[in-house]
Amino acid sequence: MNAPIGGRPPGSWLIRQLARIIPRAHRESWRDEWIGELSHSPLPPWRLRLRALGAIVDALWLARHHSSWARLDSTRFGHDVRYAARSLARRPAFSLVVVGTLALCIGATSSVFSVVESVLLRGLDYRDLNRLVAVWSNNAKESNDHYQASIGDYFDWRDRSRSFEQLAGFFPIWTAAYTAPDVAERLSVGAASANLLRTLGVRPQLGRDFAEGEDKRGAPGVAILAHAMWTRFFQQDPAAIGKSILLDGKPYTVIGVMSPAFTFPQNRVDVIVPLPILGSYFDRRGVHMLSVIGRLRAGVTIESAHGEMESIAAQLRTEHPKEDAGLTSTVRPLAADLLGDVRRPILVLFAAVFAVLLIGCANVANLMLSRVMSRQQELSVRTAMGAPPGAIARQLLTESALIAVVAGVLGVGIAFGATKAAAAALPQSIARIGVVRLDARVLTFTVVVCVVVALICGAVPALRGARNANDRTLPDAARGASRSRAARRIHSALVVTELALAMMLVVSAGLLINSLTHLTAINPGFRTHGVLRMKLELPDVKYRRGAQSDQFFETLLRDVGALPGVRSAAMVSRFPLHDGHLTSAVMPEGMSEAASDLLPDAEYRKASARYFETMDIPVIAGRPFRPTDTADSTSQLVAVVNRTAAIKYFGTPNAVGKRLRLGGSQTPLFTVVGVVGDVREISLRESAPPVAFISTRQGLATAGSIVISYDGAPGPVLAGVRRIVASLDKTLPVYDVQSIEEVLAKAAAGDRFTTTLLSAFALLALVLAALGTYAVIAYGVADRTREIGVRMALGAQRGEVVAMVIRDGMGLFVLALPFAFVGIWWANRAVASLLFGVQASDLSTQVIALSTLAVATAVACLIPARRAARVDPSLAIRA
Amino acid sequence: MPPTRITFPTAVVLAALSQGCRYGFEIMDATGLASGTVYPILRRLEEAGMLSARWERAADAHDEQRPPRRYYQITGAGRQAVRDAMARFPALAGVRPPAAPSPT
């Protein structure tokens, strides 16, 4: 059967597509020939399609043959690349060192850039970010200008302000038990006002946003799932919309699913639910827990919004004199607010890795320059045979470009691995903001870096090579006569740059190491080994606060305490260095409200009888809680305070017997029965805040951390706890399990991350700078062999020759010092805010760091110095 | 004009043309070479002057309601190249035009 007559033969689509790459002059003829053949052939369609595939080769051949690139290829470019590849392959050691150095530097730069890109550039993917602001209460008495709003205040702000298109409130760190058949898990919940997503300028990927009024008390429960939760529990089934899920035993209808790119402000959450999930907090104006974000109306400035919020705060102070006493308001750009604490370390790391890249480039430029000088004969031969200087320069630039391309490809591989490792090691403060990964922007950045690297590394050698090849006569070059002073100056300048940058990095790393040592050496005030903590929460709908919850925890702690290896078990509402702030106003007995308003709030904790014993927190005065401190009407309400609280509120460390109110003049008086030692509650860096403990029984606690001190292995203890909890209530999840070592490690994770990376960069910088020094000194020694020979023939001792060479090397070090001091001054300002327990100007750190580098430089000079000392004068002079 | 290297496949294509094959698919049928090999060789040989090409008369093609086909013909230089190649590659003697040429 013939091909379809008049119609399109099989394979004609491919031919038409391929015709696009054929030069215009040949296009029509090429297409017609193929279509003609395909139309004539009696072959079955599948064989025709197979034959049409040959047109790909044909088209590529023609395109290449007729393009200007092909002409360039055949005349210059291809030749240069092939020549460069052969020339690099001839010296595998040299190629390996330069490609390896650059690959490492490019890989490190790209992976740090991936963090910069995902956290600082892409992290806040909200519409018109510059119109978004964070609105905080400003609590003057605690010098806290990041004080959250109470839910009542937030609704008043929202109703009264005119500066904002939207004003949204949210609590990012709520948790709820999610129960479904075969599932009992704690989820991280973002409690939000109905307009949060509209304020941020984002929409659910699936389903709908919250409607106005769905954040009012009594509205039916609705929930929007994070993409990860939709994937995990619903396998991305669109039918999840409309389903009901149980959170803390209450039903919520799923109305939407967010896109994977969405990040909830301040925390990664599994599900977003309207504010009423916060339960009783919803109505308590004294509890300040909401973060507030506003979208400014067009034309409204931050200053005018701030003015309006100040006047609203003044109204609220009058209307709610107790809860809002001393509160003003602050309005700040959201980006600066959310990224404030992470921007600095990331930028410091980026600057550091960039310095390492520069050092790497200087090193490679140096090596390439040395190599160009040693290839003088070859280049002179090429010049003598008619190669113009431009061709020599182009050839040398092609070599550096080839090196940069190969290093870039390897660097991307290194960055891929390093980025994965970095994403896993990132501290929570950074990781919460964006997903760190290599994407198109990072790859584009890498390509730009490669181009810059090729230019930096190649330009100087190319220019020198071209000039020298032109200037030098063939016999000169062949004799390998003394090399130019200018080349030596370039070498030295490059090494001085490397040394100065390395000094800057080593000093910064030294300061951070010193700071981390101080931080981890801090005594947090509690037992630092053999303690486990985990969370447990009794759902309100199932357990009545009081007798029922008391009974549960009493049985649990008794049974856990009886497990083999367990020394004691206790419970606390918020665990130090883990759960963050929850504060309460404090009013010592006998003090006026006005006077107590000036006192700082206390961190408010509920602790069970054996908490202080379990955590090894010393009881300085009085007694710890007892099982008899119950909510029973016959029991006295008791409190334990820490040392700082005793001094701040009562002016004495021994406050036993004193009484105080927690939360205002209408609240009951608690009698202080004990004073305990200070503990780092919030972070390792912050000294202990005042803390007021009440007993879990009197505080009607239904949730918190179970704390267990034990001897031996933690595994059996944890298994025992899970077994006991399951025997009491199968549906209760035990979650967020950590050893005390993990708590402490996490508390220092951010510092450790920055310090480790910066130290690694500093070490790399030190090694590269030492290698650079070595290369230059070795090159100098080779260059001056004859001179050294003459000196030795004239009576110079080997020791003197060694000293002379080392002096040359150390001369470079001294030359680098003034530049380094400028760099160090600048770097110190950048790292100062990251330091703990050490001043940026710390002299001993600087001396140690610079001495380390001096020793490294001296060692780098030693090998060429010993080689110089072994020069045989008779051979050297004849050479 | 750049000299054309006469590789074995190139010699095979030249031999097929000298045996009377006239267009790409016919050469493929006669030689068993793939289309991705035959066409670039035809381009190079044409550029080197070893064969010439012409389009089928439009009227003939139109009568049969199909597009015209491109025919190749070996030149004197091509014949000389075939002779040289025959000496180098005795296996070329086995190249025959297809037994039943496809209808045009």
Image (cartoon, helix red, strand yellow):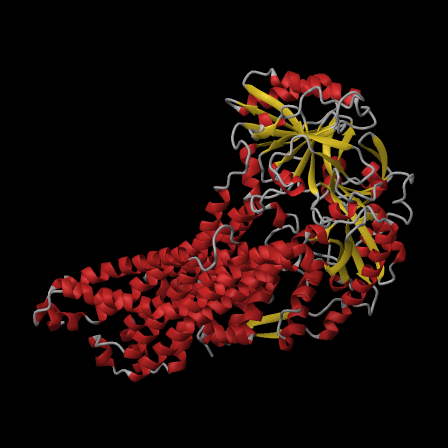
The residue located at (67%, 60%) in the rendering is A336
Residue placed most toward the observer, A225 or A501? A501
Count of numbered labels shown in the rendering = 0
Q: Position of residue A281 (x, y in %)?
A: 81, 39
Residue placed most toward the observer, A869 or B32? A869
Which image quadrant is residue A100 in?
Answer: bottom left
Which image quadrant is residue A95 in?
Answer: bottom left
Q: Is residue A382 shown left or right of residue A504? A: left
Q: Position of residue A496 (x, y in %)?
A: 36, 69
The residue located at (41%, 67%) in the rendering is A821
Q: Is residue A518 shown left or right of residue A376? A: right
Residue extending farthest front? A590
State whether residue A846 appears in this view: yes
The residue located at (36%, 79%) in the rendering is A466
Q: Is residue A595 shown left or right of residue A382? A: right
Answer above or below: position of A148 versus A96.
above
Q: Position of residue A242 (x, y in %)?
A: 87, 39
Answer above or below: position of A801 versus A685.
below
State whether residue B20 appears in this view: no
Q: Position of residue A91 (x, y in %)?
A: 32, 61
Q: Quadrant of the C terminus of chain A?
A: bottom left
Answer above or below: position of A779 versus A424.
below
Residue placed most toward the observer, A826 or A714? A826
Q: Quadrant of the N terminus of chain A?
A: bottom right
Answer above or below: position of B49 versus A585.
below
